Image (cartoon, rainbow, N blue to C red):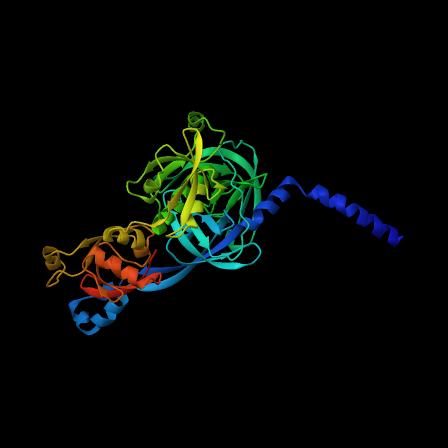
Amino acid sequence: MATANGALAGALAPAHESTRRTPVVIAVEKAGPSVVNISTEQIVVRQGDPFYQFRDPFFDQFFSEYFERFARPQQFRTHSLGSGVIIDPEGHVVTNEHVVRKASRIDVTLADGSKYEGKLLSGDPESDLALIELNAKKPLPALRLGRSDDLMIGETVIALGNPFGLESTVTVGVVSAKNRSVTLEGREAYAGLVQTDAAINPGNSGGALVNIEGELIGINVAIRADAQGIGFAIPVDRVREVLKGLFNYRLIKKTYIGVRGRDLTPEDLARHKTAARSGVLVMGVDPESPAAKAGLAEGDLITAVDSAPVADMLQFFKKMLDKNVGDTVALRVLRGGKEQVIRVAVAAAPKPSGAEVARTRLGLSLQPMTAELARSFGFREPAGLIITALEPGGPGDKAGLMRGDVLLRVGDVAVQTPEQLAVALEQDGSGQVRVLIARRGHLYRAILPVR
């Protein structure tokens, strides 16, 4: 009898399992391997004098050195958690910009337990999206990007992430609303969001919102920790547009061919009278650039890079990321209804000005010191560069620098012009640099991450 029951149970098991393998389960199996845990470390600089109420000339003559030691910037390390989504086999991960903002170190853990140190390529605080690169030696599981323009109210959606540091957590809900705007601290912080009743909690930020097909339709953003039954995601169509800029930012810093383009529209395809359904329309070519010298022209339609089809600017930028200075790239082009291949030599990106280097690599706007300014700062003669503005979340901001600080040395180099700063950064090449600054009559040292 026992044998008969055992055989019966074995026979029923496959059928029972098949009823449990719902479309949600299948979608999670597709998307789950592409959702990662992101752990960040941040260096926080705090400044203040806890003994200010005791300060007077009498005590200062005995304890001024002790007081000043506590008034100087103090560095602390903090940690935070978030999620991210692998978007291609090469190891590019998209997440919320606020997840990696001011991070001095980014550690990424995949669903299979493998760990990588992530490198922040670029971020966009306005859209709250950032791009991370993993130096993987093998292709990684990438999540297919779907569409968000055809989402239906009531459609089933699934949120995947790592809330509260828990691994691979899944919640299910429906699309509650589209094109939602969220106001924080009296300003519109997010616009055009997808609203869902799937739980999106701290740690879910940067994770995936997928449809029942297991396709990415949004990047989760945890706006309020106490929100119940309300979650939001940045729609994937918006993510796709922002990624073009994030990849291009990386491309500009590395290589250059001098072409500007955009995605094709149905009108473009009709105008070109082509059977191609996708590609990149050349909007302009820089004079004397490699593209111009090779014969590429405004109005050309690029359909492939090195025989690999490109559907849009995002794919074009990703293909170009693999190119190095000195390489030749073969662009398949449609012009006047005829197809041709144009070979373009990849060049080094034009050397930026010192001021541009300071902005892009350190997040600093700088002004050379003049004799008049030197006197106002108490210097006998002009020295250093005055910090006039800082990029929020940029390297200088992360290191605790402030507007009005005077940058005196970068590494071992005294700097009086932005060009000298650019040379010092190029000579260092370590990914971070020691700086000496003057602030309110005191000298401080700091370590800046360099992009």
How many circles with numbers are drawn on the protein? 0
Residue 50 appears anywhere in the view: no
Residue 362 appears anywhere in the view: yes
Image point 12% across, 59% down: which residue? 374
Indicate the position of residue 422 as horizontal and vertical percent values.
26, 57
Q: Tell me the quadrant of the picture where the C terminus can be found.
A: bottom left
Indicate the position of residue 85 as horizontal and vertical percent values.
50, 48
Q: Nearer the viewer, residue 269 or 326?
A: 326
| 123 up-or-down from 211: above or below | below
Q: Nearer the viewer, residue 130 or 234?
A: 130
Indicate the position of residue 18 as horizontal and vertical percent values.
72, 43
Q: Give the side of residue 215 with respect to residue 330, left or right.
A: right
Image point 15% across, 56% down: which residue? 369
| 10 up-or-down from 53: above or below | above
Indicate the position of residue 159 as horizontal and vertical percent values.
54, 44
Q: Give the side of residue 199 with respect to residue 5, left or right.
A: left
Residue 377 occupies quadrant: bottom left
| 125 up-or-down from 116: above or below | above
Q: Residue furthest right?
A: 1
Residue 440 occupies quadrant: bottom left
